[in-house]
Image (cartoon, rainbow, N blue to C red):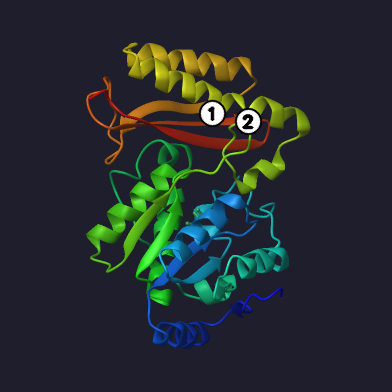
Amino acid sequence: MGGHRAVQLIREIDALRSAVATVRADGGTVALVPTMGALHAGHMALVAEAKRRGAHVVASIFVNPTQFGPNEDLSLYPRREASDARMLEEGGCAILWAPDVAVMYPDGHATSVRVSGVSDDLDGAARPGHFDGVATVVAKLFNQVRPDIALFGEKDYQQLAVIRRMARDLDWPVEIIGVPTQRDADGLALSSRNLYLSDEERVAARMLPRALGEAAQAIRDGKAVAEALGAARERLAAAGFDPIDYVELRDAGTLAPLATLDRPARLLAAARLGRTRLIDNLPVLPAD
Ligand code: PAF
């Protein structure tokens, strides 16, 4: 494909281990970019950051059933492996790890990883069990690939915090790298789930980054946090978001609730437009 070295598509763990050993023998580090496929520029920014760091890139595509709730979109989740593989190849990925469910979770699989505290509220409360599923599959991916670095988008900010906590707690020799959110021209964070939005919902969706941006600015300017969050909720409701799961200011590292901007913070929101649940977040730094 156009001068790019072909990406190796691998579905079995033994083959993965020997392919990773072969690229490792070339020298340099191994980077893991975990995904659920339906790739977009946000995922490709993770691959590009790994390449910029000089790493051999292993991308995984696995639509992980254990992180979907019973009424969530597992069966609808977009699957487009052939075009994903082409994008990864053009991005310079060495290996595409795409196991079947039976390889990831063979009969009798009984182990789950739970990261308490940082997993408990926000998306953890709105989607019970979600972060246990994420932590479990990421733990398995770390053991399967044994990367030196692993890259995750800041769009899933709580997920990134959960994975950082897990890697630290379990002494994994892997550096976790958060990559800033990629956005469309109107500010909407790129997400595979944006594919579910109707044209009308896609227009309304731009209120999510806008309301967050306004609240972040108001908080930086000294407005009371509760008031700024209330105003953001009102703007989202007026744009048609229903329900609004949360709009919250949190400690940027621990995700503990913050009533005032007295340390680096993150403003996080999740809300539904029709059948699509959107999340977004922005940094909010106190003035020096
Ligand atoms: O962010 C995602 O796409 C998924 O949660 C991840 C990290 C690949 C685990 O399934």
Q: Quadrant of the N terminus?
A: bottom right
Residue 155 located left or right of residue 90? left
Task: Identify which residue is drawn at 70% across, 32% down.
Answer: 202
Tell me the amino acid under the disc marked 2. Asp
Tell me the amino acid under the disc marked 1. Pro
Name the outermost residue toward the right. Answer: 199
The quadrant holding residue 193 is: top right
> Which residue is at the front of the view, 180 or 78?
180
Q: Which residue is mark 1?
A: 209
The picture places residue 108, in percent across and down from the top left corner, at 47, 74
Helix or strand or loop: what does disc 1 sit on? Answer: helix
21 versus 7 height, above or below: below
The quadrant holding residue 20 is: bottom left
> Which residue is at the front of the view, 84 or 125?
84
The picture places residue 153, in percent across and down from the top left corner, at 47, 50
Residue 63 located left or right of residue 118? right
The Cα atoms of the two marked residues, 2 and 1, are separated by 9 Å
The picture places residue 84, in percent across and down from the top left corner, at 66, 63
Q: Which residue is mark 2?
A: 186
Residue 41 located left or right of residue 173? right
The 10 Å Cα crowd at callout 2, few under 14, some 14 to 19, many 20 or more, is: few
Q: Quadrant of the C terminus?
A: top left
Visible residue check, residue 203: yes
Task: Identify which residue is drawn at 47% across, 37% down.
Answer: 126
Beta carbon at label 1 within 8 Å of ligand 1 = no
The picture places residue 7, in percent across and down from the top left corner, at 61, 76
Helix or strand or loop: what does disc 2 sit on? Answer: loop
